[in-house]
């Protein structure tokens, strides 16, 4: 077993041992079943919090956090707000915010040989195209109408309130849980170790391409090979479940 997969296995075991817990971040409390990915401990840890506002004309967001959880929430107002919570041993990380060609790139770099991690909570206009990447951490995408993409090396991926036509989710070790409130045209989801759960409206018919090597496939949505909407989902260890979107409760 090479070093990368040894790390993935260790993280997956840690996930199984920690079980479910609710996020401590307000933006992530929409579900009580979110599992945050354990991250490496930092000796003599210090913490710092940062807040940035981006008013430039931005149509796409790219978040690249080597270690740390990422939350991106769509909102019905202009501008982007970036909240960053950093944990580090001796010197704080450099928070990156670059705008180029209509794309905002957010990330961080640690000082040389100084361990650190950053958790990002970002609010964007709901039609922003979002791509989030982390090596170790969970990703939570919420209320987005544009293209959504999430990729984790070891971590869980959650999405809710999506109305965009295309979405892509992948993780090496962790589950994927995504819910759409409007029928998507193309969805891909893959994991090596974990269960994939995708909820879509039953007002459309879907072409399903699924594979669960050591698990089962459950699909209870309208299906047809000629459908214009395609869902591709695969896992090596776990199940694939594609079910109807559960309507949010109506407040009285």
Image (cartoon, helix red, strand yellow):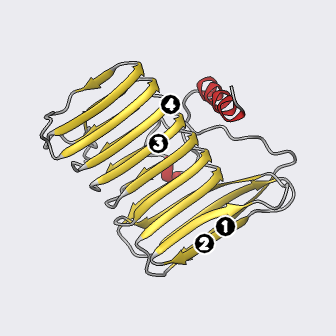
Would residue 176 be visible to someone looking at this image? no
Secondary structure category for the residue under label 3: strand
Which of the two discs, 4 and 2, labels the residue nearer the N terminus?
Answer: 2
Figure check: 178 above or below 82: above
Which of the two discs, 3 and 4, labels the residue nearer the N terminus?
Answer: 3
Asked whether disc 1 touches disc 3, contact meaning CB atoms under 8 Å apart, the reply is: no
Residue 50 marker: 1
Q: Which residue is denoted by mark 3 in the rendering?
A: 170
Distance from Cα at disc 1 to Cα at disc 2? 12 Å
Distance from Cα at disc 2 to Cα at disc 3? 24 Å
Which of the two discs, 2 and 3, labels the residue nearer the N terminus?
Answer: 2
The quarter of the displayed image where residue 173 is located: top right
Q: Which residue is denoted by mark 2 in the rendering?
A: 97
Query: Where residue 174 sits in the image (x, y, percent)?
Result: 52, 33
**Are there few (<14), some (14-19), or many (20+) residues within 10 Å of tag 2?**
some
Q: Which residue is denoted by mark 4 in the rendering?
A: 192
Distance from Cα at disc 3 to Cα at disc 4? 9 Å
Q: Give the camera-side residue of 131 and 78.
A: 131
Secondary structure category for the residue under label 1: strand
Asked whether disc 4 touches disc 2, contact meaning CB atoms under 8 Å apart, the reply is: no
Q: Quadrant of the N terminus?
A: top right
Distance from Cα at disc 4 to Cα at disc 1? 34 Å
Q: Nearer the viewer, mark 1 or mark 2?
A: 2
Secondary structure category for the residue under label 4: strand
Residue at screen point 47% across, 50% down: 150
Which of the two discs, 1 and 2, labels the residue nearer the N terminus?
Answer: 1
Q: Nearer the viewer, mark 1 or mark 3?
A: 3
Secondary structure category for the residue under label 2: strand
Residue at screen point 35% across, 58% down: 147
């Amino acid at each position: 077993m090479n070093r990368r997969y040894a790390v993935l296995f260790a993280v997956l075991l840690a996930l199984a041992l920690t079980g479910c817990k609710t996020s401590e971040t307000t933006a992530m409390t929409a579900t009580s079943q979110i599992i945050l990915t354990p991250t490496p401990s930092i000796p003599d840890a210090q913490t710092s919090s940062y807040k940035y506002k981006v008013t430039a004309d931005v149509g796409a967001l790219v978040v690249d956090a080597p270690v740390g959880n990422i939350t991106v929430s769509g909102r019905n107002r202009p501008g982007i707000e970036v909240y960053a919570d950093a944990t580090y041993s001796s010197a704080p990380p450099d928070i990156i915010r670059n705008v180029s060609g209509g794309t905002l790139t957010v990330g961080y770099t640690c000082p040389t040989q100084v361990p650190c991690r950053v958790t990002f909570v970002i609010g964007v206009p709901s039609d922003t195209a979002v791509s989030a990447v982390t090596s170790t951490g969970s990703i939570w995408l919420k209320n987005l109408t544009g293209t959504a993409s999430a990729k984790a090396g070891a971590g869980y991926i959650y999405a809710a309130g999506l109305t965009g036509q295309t979405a892509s989710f992948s993780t090496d070790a962790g589950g994927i849980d995504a819910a759409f409130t409007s029928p998507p045209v193309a969805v891909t989801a893959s994991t090596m170790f974990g269960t994939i759960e995708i909820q879509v409206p039953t007002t459309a018919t879907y072409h399903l391409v699924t594979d669960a090597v050591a698990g089962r496939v459950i699909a209870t949505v309208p299906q047809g090979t000629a459908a214009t909407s395609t869902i591709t989902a695969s896992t090596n260890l776990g199940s694939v479940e594609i079910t109807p979107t559960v309507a949010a409760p109506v407040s009285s």
